[in-house]
Image (cartoon, rainbow, N blue to C red):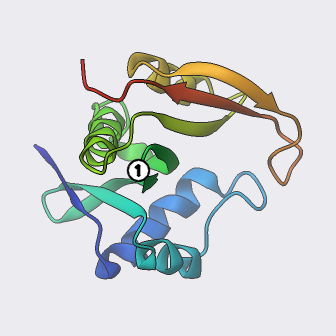
Amino acid sequence: MTEIRPMRWWDIPAVHHIEEQCFSRFPGDSWSIQQFWQELAQPTRSYVVAVDGASIVGYAGAFILAPDSDIQTVAVDPRYRGRGIADQLIEALMTQAGIGGATSMLLEVRADNAAAIALYERHGFEPLSRRSKYYPDGGDALIWRRRPLAMS
């Protein structure tokens, strides 16, 4: 059974390892260890990890400053995909955003990332716009929003 809990500073090495596995194929997309430290230091951020036994198998984070919230990142170790872990992480972020008084949640997703788009659609996100050449390699981003944030 996967447990979702708040991310702590000592989780950063394991989280960064997953980050590199998931995002290193796109130059400039993967975050550095320093970026994770900076994110955790911000009072407007909420980060969670998915833990299976003693192993961190996924993580997600959001910017929350009511009435707004914005998913910053979501990643699951490739060996653990297809088990609903990303769904649990998204639900945890939406819950935290709601507790923080947010009424909607935004995110950017690569336009060619069909798996992530399907994940966000399952959670009631809808497309808003497109940002051309948003990513360092020139890839486009789709902007999605869920409103209201109340869980269905």
- What is the quadrant of residue 117 in the picture? top right
| Element at label 1 | loop
Q: Nearer the viewer, residue 134 or 65?
A: 65
Front one among 4 and 42: 42
The x, y position of residue 63, in whole percent, is 47, 56
At a point 86% along the width and 50% down the height, the residue shown is 137
Q: Which one is nearer the viewer's eye here, 23 or 88?
A: 88
Circle 1 residue: 77
- The three-letter code of the residue at mark 1 reads Asp
Q: Quadrant of the N terminus?
A: top left
The correct choice, above or below, for 1 with respect to 121 in the image is below
In this view, 77 is above or below 149: below
Q: x, y percentage for residue 108? A: 64, 39
x, y percentage for residue 140? 81, 35
Decide which of 67, 107 is in the foreground and name it.
67
In this picture, residue 70 sits left or right of residue 61 = right
Is residue 147 shown left or right of residue 130?
A: left
Q: Label 1: how many residues lie within 10 Å, few (<14), some (14-19) or many (20+)?
A: some
Image quadrant in which the C terminus is located: top left
Identify the residue at horizontal 29%, vertical 75% (top origin).
Answer: 8
Q: Specify whether 112 is left or right of 121.
A: right
